[in-house]
Image (tube, rainbow, N blue to C red):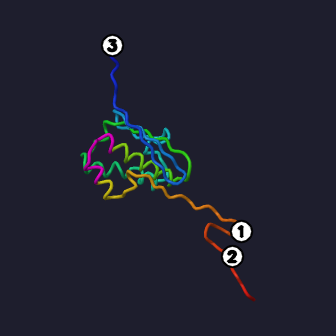
């Protein structure tokens, strides 16, 4: 029997509020897909820019066009559009650090924004009983 050739596949996840992103990186042709759509077709434009941040920063450390030999696939669900974008950004940052094994890249990500490699754990505070929200209190009037 022939030995099966194993290829390096990196799988990570990122979270932001209610959004959860799972990113898979492997050797390939340089395609970046989010929920089955190419990154060029992803809308809105501001969310696409947020998702591409780790790749742009990694180019300064790893060299231009490093991702052209990688296939990046992300599946994101839950939350809103920007929450999904930030979750995808975190998962992509973690995956790039793990794939490259570069301490310089990890340091660069941390200097730029810590949430590129560490999940944002903040959550919405629940609404309280007999109040309009989490902190708003009823108005007290004497007249």
Q: Is residue 90 left or right of residue 131?
A: left
Would you identify the image quadrant in which residue 108 lies?
bottom left
Q: Residues within 10 Å of mark 2 (few under 14, many from 20)?
A: few
Q: Residues within 10 Å of mark 1 (few under 14, many from 20)?
A: few
Would you name the residue on which mark 2 appears?
Answer: 138
- Which secondary structure, mark 2? loop
* Residue at the (26%, 51%) spot, across then down: 60
Would you name the residue on which mark 3 appears?
Answer: 2
Would you name the residue on which mark 1 appears?
Answer: 130
- Which secondary structure, mark 3? loop
Q: How far is the residue under mark 1 from the one under mark 3?
A: 69 Å
Tell whether position 101 is magenta: yes
Location of the N terminus (image quadrant): top left
Q: Residues within 10 Å of mark 3 (few under 14, many from 20)?
A: few
Q: Are marks 3 and 2 in contact (CB under 8 Å)?
A: no
Q: How far is the residue under mark 1 from the one under mark 2?
A: 8 Å
Q: Name the one closer to the observer, 57 or 103.
A: 103
Q: Position of residue 40 (x, y in %)?
A: 43, 45
Does label 1 or label 3 sit earlier along the sequence?
3
Does label 1 or label 2 sit earlier along the sequence?
1
């Amino acid at each position: 029997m022939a030995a099966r050739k194993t290829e390096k596949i990196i799988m990570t996840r990122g979270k932001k509020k209610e959004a959860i992103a799972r990113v898979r990186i492997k050797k390939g042709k340089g395609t970046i897909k989010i929920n089955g759509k190419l990154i060029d077709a992803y809308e809105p434009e501001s969310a696409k820019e947020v998702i591409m941040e780790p790749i742009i920063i990694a180019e300064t450390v790893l060299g231009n066009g490093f991702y052209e030999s990688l296939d990046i696939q992300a599946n994101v669900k839950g939350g809103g559009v920007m929450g999904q974008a930030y979750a995808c950004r975190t998962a992509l940052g973690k995956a790039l650090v793990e794939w490259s094994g570069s301490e310089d890249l990890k340091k660069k990500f941390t200097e730029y924004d810590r949430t590129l490699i560490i999940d944002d754990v903040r959550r919405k505070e629940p609404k309280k009983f007999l109040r309009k929200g989490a902190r708003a209190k009823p108005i007290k009037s004497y007249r």
